[in-house]
Every structure is written in C-alpha cells, then in structure tokens.
Image (cartoon, rainbow, N blue to C red):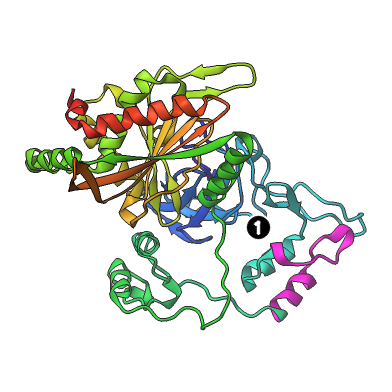
Amino acid sequence: MPKEIYLVKVGMNMTEGIVEEWCIADGETVEKGDLIYRLETEKVNLDVDAEATGIVKHIVPEGVPMKPGDVVGYIYEPDEAIPDILPRAGGPADAAASSAVEAPPAGAPSQPTAATVQIASDGRLFSSPAARRLARETGVEIATVNGTGPGGRIVEADVQAAATAKPEPAKPPASSPMARKLARELGVDLTRTRGTGPGGRITKEDVEQAAAAPAAAAFAPGEDRTIPVRAMRRTIATRMYESLQASAQLTMDMDVNMDDAVKLRTQLIDEWEDEGLRPTYTDLVIRASAKALEKHPNVNSVYGETEITLRGDINVGMAVALEEGLIVPVVRHANQLTMKQLVQESARLAAAARDGTLTPDDLHDGTFTVSALGMFGVDSFTPIINSPQSGILGVNRIRDGVRWEGATPRKTQEMRLSLTWDHRVLDGAPAAQFLAAVRDLLEAPYRLLV
C-alpha cells in the first residue's frame, strides 16, 4: 500500500496551506528523511521531509489551497504497481477510496466519475484516463485545457491540440533537494544554472557559484512583470484592510530625549559583549511599553460588541520586515522578563523570522505591537493596528536635536514615537498618558532594569 503524503498541520490555528514547491518531481524516487515539499501557510513556511522511501506521485499541484491533514500525494514502494488513475485529493477519509476506476463501457452515457482530478479548492476537472496520460507525457497542464467531450470532459484530442499549440515550457534541470532549498534562499533561478553533477544534476556548489556570479537583467527595460501574491502577502493585505475598516484608528507623535537611553544601551553592549548580546533601541522601547501597559491596561485590550476585554498577559509583538512581507513574532510576558531576558528573546525571534524557523506559538496571542522603521531613516509614520489589538507603537530614527538650558542651546539625541490607538477603546487623553509613560521610562532608562 502506498504511504500518504499529508499537508502538515503547523499549530492549532492553521486552517489552510499550500504546497509551495514540490522538491521531488512526480515519478522521482525519494529517500526517507529527504525534503519532499515546502509548505506555505499564512504565517510561516516549513520544509517537510519524506516519511518513507519510494516513488513520489503528486495529486495536488503547487499553489492549491488545502486543509491541514489533506492528502497531497503518495509514496509508492519501488516494486509496487502504480495505477494510471490516482486517488483524488482530499482528507484521509477520501484517500482511502479506491484508486482504480475503469473507463465506462462502450455506448454508455458519458458521465463524470469518481476518478476526477481536483485542481482547485472549489471545483474539479473531469478528464479521461487517456487524456491525463497524454498530458503527463507531453507536459501539458491539464487544468488549462478546454474540454470538448460530453459535459465538458477533457478527451485525448483536446490534450493533443493543446500540446501542439503550446510551446514546450522551460523545465528546471535535475537538482538535489539541498540545491533547491539553497536556490530559494539565495534567489537563484535553477533554469539558468549549469549543473556539474552526474548527468548534469545541479549541486549545492553550483547554486553557490551562480549566486556569486553577476546577475543578468531578467527583464527588458520598460517591460511589465507580475509578482504572484503569496500566502503571507495576501494575509497582510487582508488583515491591514480589515483592521482599518473595523476600528477607529488615530495616530499621535511624541518626542523623546534619548541621551540617557543611548548611554545605557552602550553600557549594556559592553557588559554583555562576552555573551554576544547586543540590545537594540527597539528592545528598550518594548521594555518601556510593557512596563507602561501595566499602568495603562486599557491600551492592552480588545474591543468587543458589548464589552472591552483587558488582557491579563502583556505579550508584545515585534514587527520584523522580511523580503516576502512583514511578520510579527511575540515576546510573551514581556513585563515579567528582565532586560537581559527580553534582549535574548527578541534576538531569538528576529533570527528565527529571518531563517524561516518561527513556530506558530511564536506568532500567537500578541496583545500590543511595536514596529520600528528608524533604521530606514524614518522620522514619523502611521502604523496600522494588528487587529484585534488596540494599539501599536512606531519607533523612528534617533536624530540630533536641541534643548535649551536657559539661554544656552545643548545638542541632544531625540527620537519620535508614533502611537496608533483604537478610539473605540480609549480617547486621546488616556492614549497620550500611556505614550508619555513610555517616554518617561526611556528618558530615565535605568528604571527599565528593575
């Protein structure tokens, strides 16, 4: 019996995912423990390893939304007969269905059978076994073929016509799983990479060499190009739009004298140098925000139709910008951590976000968010609330400022904080009081150490 390949469930809150990339081509052999496909969810990506050795057969193409636990393919033993018609995509119960469905007898009315190929979450594609076999042989994507058979069924002639009309697509050359993974990380196009392994197979060293070579222009001047909206980008777009539509958001700015905070950070870097810890200004802001939230619980809340829930825990999200979008890992119980513990945890979360190793628990249950753009030279911006939270604090750059001591000007280090809050939860005055509390802690930063 073949071994099912499931869409892995990552965390309790995952409801949908896609096979972002099959790392073992349909019909190729995989070894147990090898990378078989890359899972993409709305929050995290994950490399999934094979649980058995054998021949891989796909039943779900890349990019099709599926539910956790759905069967997306099979691994057949090397000496096992592989049927022409595979079980249809779906959950474990569906996967247990018979995998062999015979063609209807001659003269029988042509009706859709159970052996349909599901190509999308909201529909199925009906095609004959001969059409599917020819599509595999000619490299035609059967989902793009117009069916002319009874009821729109795709027949062999339809596939033949599509194969004749459609130019042969560029196929990636053979490559090792490690090479494919590294190519994704380095942005290397495998179709333009020369393989030096056996039979022209692309190796890890080939990818590294291609990444180091000067990049050729991929698009002609003035040429339009499209970028697919992946799960993370789609989730960001949806949530930001919904956040603005569902709450009354306002933003206020407040300047902070960072002279003492700059000194403290420098001293902490020296103190923790042997441990490899380098606190950031965002760390100081997260710590100040957590302490201020203890005294201003309305900011650490969720608005409901009939009540406002003041959250018992203070879990501060820290926005991390990645190439594919923004992700917000959470420093849990930030008010209960020491300054050193907070720096260690934020460093761990930032590294995991960049490496793609965040877990769903790292992203769950934030109650307030801090977002920093100061490293890009930004003086002020309007952050959007991470719903259902009630506030988000923007951290801007540290700049030269001037303070007057009597008639004498004095150069200072200044930073502007940008607070966006939900006016349904609290008014301007209490929002300003919270922001002032954060400012006061940063201007007397040694209070952050207690």
**Residue nearest the observer in this picture, 119 or 401:** 401
- Magenta-colored stretch includes residue 442: no
What amino acid is found at the position of numbered circle 1 in the picture?
Asp
Residue holding disc 1: 84
Q: Residue 153 lies in magenta, yes or no?
A: yes
Left or right relative to 273: residue 323: right
Mark 1 closeness class: few <14, some 14–19, many ≥20 residues within 10 Å:
few
Residue at (46, 21) in percent of width and height: 298
Residue 17: % across, % down: 55, 44
Residue appearing at x 62%, y 35% in the figure: 246
Taking the spot 78% from the left edge, 71% from the top edge, the residue there is 158
Vertical placement of residue 445 versus 113, above or below: above
Q: Kindly give the residue lying farthest to the front in the view shown.
A: 407
- Does the rendering let one see residue 289? no
Chief secondary structure of the magenta portion: helix
What stretch of residues is rendered in magenta? 143-164
Where is residue 250 shown, x and y percent of the image? 53, 37
Q: In the structure shown, which secondary structural element does the residue marked by tag 1 occupy?
A: loop
Q: Which quadrant, please, contains the C terminus?
A: top left
**Which residue is painted at 67% across and 47% down in the image?**
88
Q: In x, y percent, where is residue 340?
A: 18, 32
Question: Looking at the picture, how far across and down is residue 36, in whole percent?
Answer: 44, 52
Front-lying residue, 278 or 171: 278
* Quarter of the image that includes the N terminus: top right
Is residue 63 in view?
yes
